[in-house]
Amino acid sequence: MFTDPLTSISLIVFAYLLGSVSAAIITCKLMGLPDPRTQGSNNPGATNVMRIGGKKAAAITLLGDMLKGLVPVLVARWFTGNELTLALVAVAAFLGHLYPLFFGFKGGKGVATSLGAILGISWPVALAMIVTWLIVAYGFKISSMAALVASALSPFYFWFFSGSTIYMIMGSFIAVLLIWRHRSNIQRLLEGTET
């Protein structure tokens, strides 16, 4: 389905702006917790929020981060079925989380937001990623490793479930950025010191 350029650009900008809203920082502020950028791993994400505020705060953060990836894609679906537009909207929400306009372009690592965006595009791919995460996390007890493996396999899952080249490229782009954002975790994995 054709989407006019103005609509596509508006959807992409909306996705980036929504992605720029930090669920971790807002949740911690509302719950009277320290700023996650100054505590623990200094990462505004659900894992770090759990370290400083417990499971409830982490669950709220996780849900918020997923929704800001999911909602823009669902809104875009309302206007268009164009694969390129949907892929760009998903990437924009993801980039908003990584480089948020409202927080000095210093955001989180993007696992939950990317999963939410992918869920909006293809629930079978998102489900396959969740199952992969659970298997790796159960086997190795390392969340970052599970996230990296699940993300790295997402292009294959897109190929298997949709056959869409555009979505495979999108999945690959997100996976590469996730790996880059997790480079400190990867270093610790190689050193055997990752928790």
Image (tube, grey):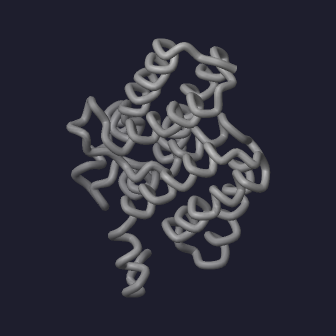
Residue 9 image-quadrant placement: top left
User: In the image, what residue occupies the spot 64% across and 18% down?
Assistant: 2
Q: Residue at x 49, y 51 (%)?
A: 174
Measured as percent of width and height from the top left, residue 90 is found at 53, 36
Question: Can residue 81 be seen in this snapshot?
Answer: yes
The answer to whether 98 is drawn above or below residue 40 in the figure is above
Q: Where, quadrant-wise, is the C terminus in this rendering?
A: bottom left
Q: Residue at x 72, y 50 (%)?
A: 125
Q: Position of residue 6 (x, y in %)?
A: 46, 12
Say which of 171 and 99 sits in front. Answer: 171
Identify which residue, 118 or 1, lies in the foreground: 1
Q: Is residue 37 above or below residue 79?
A: below
| Image position of 11 with respect to 176: above or below | above
Q: Give left or right: position of 138 versus 106.
A: right
Q: Is residue 134 left or right of residue 107?
A: right
Q: Position of residue 51 (x, y in %)?
A: 40, 58
Report the quarter where the N terminus lies.
Answer: top right
Asked if residue 79 is positioned above or below residue 29 in the image, the reply reads: above
User: In front here: 164 or 49?
Assistant: 164
